Amino acid sequence: MSEKKAQLIVDGRDSPIELPVYEGSTGPDVVDVSSLVGEGIFTYDPGFMSTASCDSDITYIDGDAGILLHRGYPIEQLAEKSDFLETCFLLLNGELPTADEKAAFENQIRYHTMVDEQIHQFFKGFPRGAHPMAMLCGVVGALSAFYHDTLDNDNPEHRMAAAIRVIAKMPTLASMCFKHGIGQPFMYPQNSMSFAENFLHMMFSTPCESASVSPTLSKAMDTIFLLHADHEQNASTSTVRLAGSTGTNPYACIASGIAALWGPAHGGANEAVLEMLYEIGDESHIEDYIRRAKDKDDPFRLMGFGHRVYKNYDPRAAVIRGICDEVLDELGSEDDPLFRIARKLEKIALEDEYFIKRKLFPNVDFYSGIILKAIGIPTSMFTVIFATGRTPGWIAHWNEMLSHPYKIGRPRQLYKGHTKRDYPT
Ligand code: SDX
């Protein structure tokens, strides 16, 4: 780490506190404040707006420039030239696979897509109307019951085996959440199919008839998974890291990430975008909803707009917007009323001073929901799709953390409650 320093001058102290400053390979420098606890001082940063929780080699985001790199490769290039499983390999191993490595990795995933038959019993306990994220959270955590005792977190091979298992099984479990909700039998994965094609098969085939999955739709599905694969230290990934820092098993960590992703401010936004578009209902209502989004006394927010980091544009949104055109064109839904409302809403918001000033641009969730709906995936499954795509990112960060010395995450606080007082006699 570099020899740069920062000085913290605190009123009432004789001399400044000197703190090391570290430089990354790119992006902002960081001030190492870990010694402050020894000085009797904590830093204060609710929401971690200015806090780097770790160092990482996996993903870099420049929010002002709209840059997203996975192991140095721009997301736009990966979306155009790579595919989801190759990107999973890249996130996990740090380099793109050779042709042989890619074939071997695809085979490893292919032969771990089935889940233990006992898992089927878990679904019997869920009501038909259970939210798919509630089911996914439950059954992924339950995977711990099948593997945790064969897992040594300190063994890199065991960690990679867990990574393969959880990436491979997520689409199978995701489709089971959908099938349970509609009362159809679960479909088994087909080893002859690609990852995304297999997922759509398990979603839409029945024992009576195989669904025909067009190359356009399976490519669109694969790219949606790829675009969601990782995103630095977002709320759900930070949850996975924090859970992992206690030494718990990776399935419990991934289940904690799923729980965090569910929130409408995070991964639940794609579902909330569709609900918002349905609520707007007609282009003539857009102006009123824009007014409401700007009204501080109105809790309504434009779902799919804004981002904690991207203050220019979300590069994933640019890619996914193009896929939206292709899918709606193939399905003959380019006149989809929701798509028309979305386009109109985007145009108006991007010209409105309130949104421009606050740098509120469409994020990845704004268009993904429209594509998923066009493919026939119900709104309640959108965040499950996001979780399936984000799994390689979660498990890559878990593996990266465990590959180096780490401490249990244990933030402190600014205490503003009662000071010591005695129980009344
Ligand atoms: C994802 O972190 C990640 O990387 C996440 C993600 C990933 O891949 O993991 O990229 C995926 O979660 C994308 C974001 C999906 N969420 C939504 O689309 C929900 C709607 N967006 C907002 O909830 C909000 O924009 C956040 C949560 C995404 C970001 O919030 P911030 O950075 O905490 O910003 P803020 O709430 O402080 O807002 C700044 C200003 C405020 O106005 P002022 O107080 O300055 O007057 O912008 C306003 C906010 O009121 N604002 C919005 C708005 N988002 C922020 N106003 C209207 N509509 C919105 N969507």
Image (cartoon, rainbow, N blue to C red):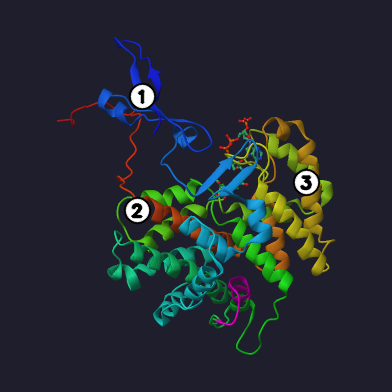
Q: Which residues make up the magenta segment? A: 190-200
Question: Which of the two discs, 2 and 3, labels the residue nearer the N terminus?
Answer: 3
Q: Amino acid at mark 3?
A: Leu
Name the outermost residue toward the bottom: 208
Which residue is pictured at 37% across the width and 50% down the height?
401
Give, as a three-letter code, the residue at label 2. Answer: Leu
Label 2, label 1: how far apart the Cα atoms are: 26 Å
Q: Residue at x 67, y 37 (%)?
A: 312
| Figure check: 101 above or below 281 | below
Q: Quadrant of the C terminus?
A: top left
The quadrant where ligand 1 appears is top right
Number of the front mark, 3 or 1 = 1
Residue corresponding to mark 3: 345
- Secondary structure of the residue carrying numbered label 1: strand
* Mark 2 / mark 1, whichever is N-terminal: 1
**Can residue 110 be seen at all in this image of the molecule?**
yes
195 within the magenta span: yes
Real-space CA distance between mark 2 and mark 3, rounded to the nearest whole angstrom? 44 Å
What label sits on residue 19 in the rendered view?
A: 1
Mark 2 residue CB less than 8 A from any atom of ligand 1: no
Q: Which of 66/310 is in front?
A: 66
Is the residue 110 above or below the residue 89 in the image?
Answer: below
Tell me which corner region of the image, top left, top right, bottom left or bottom right, holds residue 163. bottom left
